[in-house]
Amino acid sequence: MEKKNNSNTYQAAIYLRLSREDGDAGEGMKLVSNSISNQKALIMDFLKSHAEIEIHSVYADDGYSGVNFDRPNFQRMLEDIRKGIVNCVIVKDLSRFGRNYIEAGRYIEKIFPMLGVRFIAITDNYDSLDAQGGYGGDMVVPFKNLINDAYCRDISIKIRSHLEMKRKKGEYIGAFAVYGYRKDERNKNQLVIDEYAAGVVRDIFTMKMCGLSQQAIADKLNTDGILSPMEYKKSTGINLETSFKKSAQAKWCYNSVTRILKNEIYTGTLAQGKQTTPNYKIKTRVMKPEEEWVKVEDTHEAIIPAKDFALVQELLKQDTRISPEKEALYPLAGLLYCGDCKEPMVRKTIPAGGKKYVYYVCSGNKKDRSSCSPHRIPEAELTETVLCLVQMHIEKVLTLEKAMEAIEKAPGLKADVAKFDLRIRKKKGELEKAEKRKMNLYEDLKDGIITKKEYLQLKTEYDRRIGEAEMLIRSYEKEASLILESRSSLHEWARAFKEYRNIQTLERNAAVVMIKKVLVYSADRIEVIYNFNDEFARCMEYTAAYGEAPEGKEAV
């Protein structure tokens, strides 16, 4: 039996709890929900008939789940119990105390009796002072706790299922819209562009493509007085707390810029369900493998074109150390590789005669001289050669585009996908007939209609027809696909090269847009691998098929 104090009275803690799952009935800016108020009113009415109980304090956890007991005011109540200030706990019912069957039983059956604490659950008619045989003696109470636990599990399953369904439908289920967007006032699951913040996002991607590092971008944003995502949300009236904040006013930093640059949401694609919890009792979040994420494209308006986002992802993988005393990167930083061992080329400055000479050398040779030669090449010579090759490639792209336009305009050369579709259907019909006749040959042989020699001759002939038809179908499908892809993609990727048709110096932004990789074999042999190489090859094949392919190939 619980201990009473010297005056035969109990110092009681009134404990109140309401979780989001229970349905908070609060309105507006009320600090305490109506349900919390109702719980308190019921307990106060109960105490009118129990003069031996005095109220020490009221402890309320509004918005906390009953699955675990790591709730701020519950822990404060426990601390007061351990200090001996409180020796009675009163709740409206057992579900308000907790919905974890094992933990609730541990407190009611072991911890509270050990500390001499009287426990009362009013609507469940449980009072540990009157319970015969203790907590376990009243079998109704453990069963009620078990039911409360099962209820919580059922709610968890329903919520998980509902959220998964919304993710698959492409509905945004985050508590706050990501920087650059806001929630639609008419549909909280739909994102719409926040023009001011979206402008900042575009600037961040542009600065990255122009060669600035994440830290340099963050420094510029702070210098320009641009509010960080957290401070911007606060300025719009959103009360947001985050573990990323390290000072009184959150500033732009390397990590905040990187998070924006890596977030696929800016292309109009929602990637949700990245984290989960093992079950409804464990709240520690764990990352899920990327293949288990729920991705839905075109769920909202994009801020960044997909090709720009893809380019930035490649830039983030590259070794892009900043020039000393500069904010921008060297034009070819992260793009240079040894043509033989494929290790990155590194920049090296050699002072001599009061001057500084800059070279690029193979990093593989620096690590192990026996593995590769230095491939040493002066920076000025390398840059000039790459610029020359880029200018030649741009001319080829422009010539290719003109050839494509000529094909589209020339009546005799106009590519017609319908023509190939008709050919494909005709050949498939021939193929089907040949396969059917081949299958009937064996029956004819068994019935004695044809001899074995005739069977073998006819089978060989049908095999030839089938093989020929299959080959032609593949050829027609390839040509039709080539026409469609070339028509649809040329103007999109060629625009990147056309933008730099008058290029005279190799700047960082031009290099990353056009160049995928530069391979240095020697000072006399340099190979430039361009972005959109596959698209370029398809268009070349397309024009070659109609006699309009550009002649020649630039030397490297």
Image: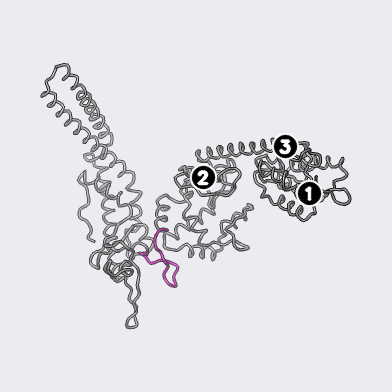
Q: Element type at marker 2?
A: loop
Q: Can residue 383 be spotted in the picture?
A: no
Instruction: Report the magenta residues as a range.
Output: 316-333
In x, y percent, where is residue 29? 71, 47
Q: Is 490 displayed left or right of 135 in the figure?
A: left
In the image, 235 versus 503, the foreground residue is 235
Kindly identify the amino acid type of the residue bearing the numbered disc 1: Gly
Callout 3 amino acid: Val
Residue 116 - label = 1
Q: How is the image coloured?
A: one colour
Q: Callout 1: helix, strand or loop?
A: loop
Q: Earlier in the sequence, mark 2 or mark 3?
A: 3
Q: Position of residue 410 (x, y in %)?
A: 24, 42
**Residue marked by disc 3:** 141
Q: Residues within 10 Å of mark 2 (few under 14, many from 20)?
A: some
Which residue is disc 2 drawn over? 273
Q: Residues within 10 Å of mark 1 (few under 14, many from 20)?
A: some
56 relative to 194 in the view: left or right: right
Q: What residue appears at the point 83 percent right and 40 percent down from the top-left corner?
A: 46
